[in-house]
Amino acid sequence: MALKGVDLDLYPGEIHVLVGANGAGKSTLVKILAGVYQPDSGEILLDGNPVVMRNPEVALASGVSVVYQNFNLIAKMDVGQNIFLNREPLKGKILRRIDWRTLYSETEKILRRLRVAIDPRAKIGDLSVAEHQMVEIAKALSIQSRILVLDEPTSALSAQEIRELFGRLQTLKKEGVAILYISHRLEEIREIGDRFSVLRDGENAGTGHLREVDLREIIRLMVGREIENIFPWEPRPLGEEMLVVENLSSPGLFSGIHFAVRKGEILGIAGLVGAKRTELAHAIFGALPVDSGRILIQGNPITVKSPKEAINVGIGLLPEDKEQHGLFPMMSVAQNISSAGLRLLKRKMGGLDLKREREIARQFVDSLHIRTPSVEVAIRSLSGGNQQKVMLAKALFARSQVVIFDEPTKGIDVGAKQDVYRLMIDLARGGKSIIMISSEIPEILGMSDRILVMKRGRISAELSREEANEKRILEAAL
Amino acid sequence: MKRKKGLASFNWSRHGTPLAFGLMIIVFALINPAFLSVRNLSQTLRQGAILFLIVSGQGLAILTRGIDLSQGSVMSLVSVATISSIYILGTYWGSLVGVLFGGLCGFINGVLIGYLRIPPILATLGMLFIALGAELVYTGGVTLTNLTDVDQIRLFWFGGGMLGPVPVPVVFAVFTGLILYFVLRCTMFGRHLYFMGANPDAARMVGVKANRVLVIVYTLSGLLAALGAFFLTARLSMGFPHLGEAWLVLSIGGAVLGGISILGGEGGIWEAILGTLVIVFLDNGLIVSGVSSFAREAIIGCIIILACMASVIRRRS
Amino acid sequence: MNPEGVPVHSIQAQGKFSGWHARWDRYGILVIFFVLLVLASIGAPHFLSFSNFLNVLQTMSFVLFVALGQTLVILSGGMDLSHGSLVSLSCMATAAVVAAGHPWLGLLAGLSVGAFCGLINGILIGIVRLNAIIATLGMLYISGGLALYFTDGKSISGIDVNKVQGFHFLAEGKLFHIPFVIYLALFFLVLTHFLLRHTRFGNHVYALGGNEAVAEIAGINFSRMKIVIFVLSGLSCGMAGALLTARMLTGEPQVGAGTFLLESIGAVVVGGNDIFGGVGNVGRTAIGLMILHFLGNALNLMGISTFSQQVVVGVVVLLFCYFGLARRR
């Protein structure tokens, strides 16, 4: 039940900001508006008339355009083709053929209207992320959309590009387009938004004018309770330095990364999408090449050229996209748990000790409270939260001393989140070093002993738990 | 979860194939009672043993989300190479060289797929034509029958002889089956294979060296097809340039029917055995019922499609 | 399906589409072709003669139909493995009807058979969403088996040349000294080019090959597209099969079993089309096919057997595959 009854209204020429924590229902709401999902109940009214968004085509025809975070563009085609996909202008009476000239000239017109300098014949694959976004917005304009939904539009943009985007949004405002602007970035929504709505646990927790509230109020509406209560953090003794990263660089991704994590410490890494935190994590884990810098484990420099080597020296990673990078869906819970540490199950005679594998898996199921009928069932039948716990068990089994969590509570329900937090604290208390990458600022503030803020591939700030607050993190991240 | 009623309550995906198998046996027996004669059954079992070897190889490739289209022509190549080598080197060394040819083809496939990253369909398709062309060039399309009597007798034992009450190929197949079962279930290599089929990206993240695994997998596929060809050749005592033609469809059919999902990551030796039995009895049953070889190929093609559809639907739900 | 489209950084990882790299991508294949012609004229006697060229082009024309169909399929992101046996089946169907005395109905029969099998392929792939490889592989066996089944493996003969002169002309006749079938092939080449470059359908084919998920979100009907694409692919095989019957005046149940499949895919790959779809055109396929055929012809003239040629062609296709893929990374 992703949405429990959301009331939202949108006026032409307004930029309405939609905020909410992960899992609050923002993307579900958007997908319903876009015609991808059907609501179980309730209705959508356009100009006072009920509209059923049966499918994406109907939504588009009704004037709703969504620009997702992951762009709906075909890299192998060019700008004009993408903008006019499935709406290519035709000419000729007998032989209906594509009017390429009109297509490209119209594309040019729209791009000029947005004051964007892109060649309509440029292949999408050659353009930057910011340019992709402009193409997406141009696509929406070409359909004469009256409602433009922007999902985290600034997450991959530079400061300059954000300013340009805001300028163009203002132009659209004046033309009467209604913009639903979804964002995590509380600082910037003030600058661009008129009104706001806060989604929490599938409901609209509050609507108002941005000029009339302060950010703390919005955070309170988002979270629903005091921050301190959710996170089971308490101080604990810290040991020596476990992992030291010196001057790590990977061209085009990040550079000059320099930090250390101690035993028993939880280091939070904050930043916006595009800050390359995941790439850094993958590089430490050996899944991405680095061209300079070094990594030390307990004072010893190590080379990590592959994930296998990283696992061997005790680095574990719980990837952000567990479907893609972490899980083996049709394999059993036990097999998933042991997957990163198979070498530990080797028998002297050759072969693996399957009995021990099952036993160990059962132990983890107990200690981590993983809800599963048995360790033999396929992991894909487990809920998201329990899958995450299996991932954790996988890292623990592989004897990880340093565990990197990349967005550990993404897409998990509140109850399971609590479990994950408690497990993290337990791990830390047990002497493990934890690096936690998260886009949820409350989570970073609540769980970390120290916080690094990354911005476009560099560390822009290092804050202790005491000196950290939302404002400082956002300032460093933007 | 709602309790399904009637037909839906039957676990089709698990018990469907065995049930179909049982029904099939009954139908064929009814059409022609000779189907159940000892002679027919033991002949079928012999074919089954050979098919099992080939299906296992194909199964390994399919498990890693690949496929080996070259098995048929590699078999032909091996048949020809074996007879030629025996002519030069004598029975035992010649046989070994012949089989190794198959391994070599498989190895080349593995390198093309694992290191040069050529998609398995294209690589093995290319190998199909290369192996086929090569052996046709060598033989000019002519069957090789130039063995000495001594060699012929020795060779025949492999394909037509018995070890006690059991035909030699069957013994070998059982032996191979046991080894493969152990490897797939209990070794790191086997586990890595499943990882690759289940989720190639995640497999990389846990340290699976995909290129090495793929080389081994396709080499094995080639070797197993070669062994199958060897036993067939041994029985015929001839190097037959078109030996493998009919076997590719049987190999893919056997793997997929038994339950080795075409999408990778699912299935094992049990499934290979089941699939082999179904295919070999189906093929035999069709022959005994008087269906022409051409229709047989069409029918098995149909069945492959149906089995894959089932696989896809199952994975989707 | 991922309604949120393609992850940001993976769009950029597609690589450069402009610059001098792209110039080699675009024209390199022509360079290779001319180099081949030069080498062939040096190494093979009688290569550089008008009659030899015409001969090669005539043989090539039959395969070009199939290669055009394959181009369509591959550009849309799929692959059609049933090409060889569909040609055989159409050949048989055509021969059967022609032998019964209806040449033009025979042509229609061949085309219909190809289209029908293509329809089945399309349904399996577009509606059941089966993997194209598996579906067309199955179809390969089914149609191959059927082609043999109806005559128990024997060919259909007994077509009187005099009664089907018009039909026979299609394949063997000459217009201004150039074999008519070449004109036919050229016509279909231009037709397919027009289809791909100037119609919405064609644009959508490229879209599917470029990114299926995004194409679907834009409202392109995956099922309908796939069905049409595979029907056209089957039709192209039907055309080839019917024309082969017109040429040989017999129905050979295994006529397509040889190199049709390898050449149809090979031409697309060698020509430089993206094997995963979304980029390329029929011109490339035509050049790719010419490279394969002229190479084979040169080898023939140098006295190398047809079996060896097959090996060489297989190796060449794999080589181009590898280099094509390596460049994409």
Image: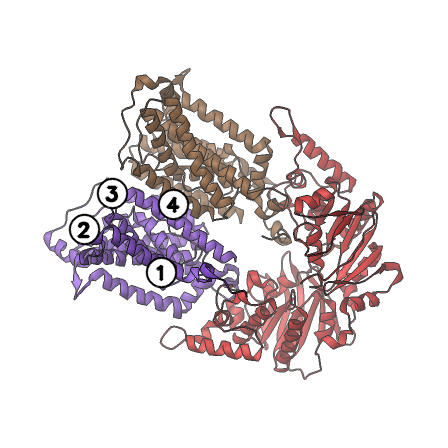
Chain colours: A red, B purple, C brown
Q: Mark 2 = which residue?
A: B236
- Dots 1 and 3: beta carbons under 8 Å? no
- Say yes or no: labels 3 and 2 on the same chain: yes
Mark earlier in primary sequence (4, 1): 1
Q: Mark 4 = which residue?
A: B126
* Mark 3 and mark 2: Cα distance apart in space: 19 Å
Q: Secondary structure at mark 3?
A: helix
The amino acid type, in three-letter code, at marker 3 is Tyr
A101 vs C82, left or right, is right
Q: Chain of mark 2?
A: B
The amino acid type, in three-letter code, at marker 4 is Gly
Mark earlier in primary sequence (3, 4): 4
Mark earlier in primary sequence (2, 1): 1
B183 vs A56, left or right, is left
- Say yes or no: labels 4 and 2 on the same chain: yes
Q: Secondary structure at mark 4?
A: helix
Q: Exactly how many numbered labels are in the figure?
A: 4
* Mark 1 and mark 3: Cα distance apart in space: 43 Å
Q: Secondary structure at mark 2?
A: helix
* Residue mark closest to the camera, 1 vs 3: 1
Asked whether residue A269 appears in the rendered view, the answer is yes
B102 vs A406, left or right, is left
Q: Chain of mark 4?
A: B
Residue B166 spot, x, y in % from top left: 19, 64
Q: Secondary structure at mark 1?
A: helix
The amino acid type, in three-letter code, at marker 2 is Leu
Q: Mark 3 = which residue?
A: B138
Residue A231 spot, x, y in % from top left: 71, 76
* Mark 4 and mark 2: Cα distance apart in space: 28 Å
Picture residue at 18% right of the left edge, 56% below the top: B39
* Mark 3 and mark 4: Cα distance apart in space: 18 Å
* Residue mark closest to the camera, 3 vs 4: 4
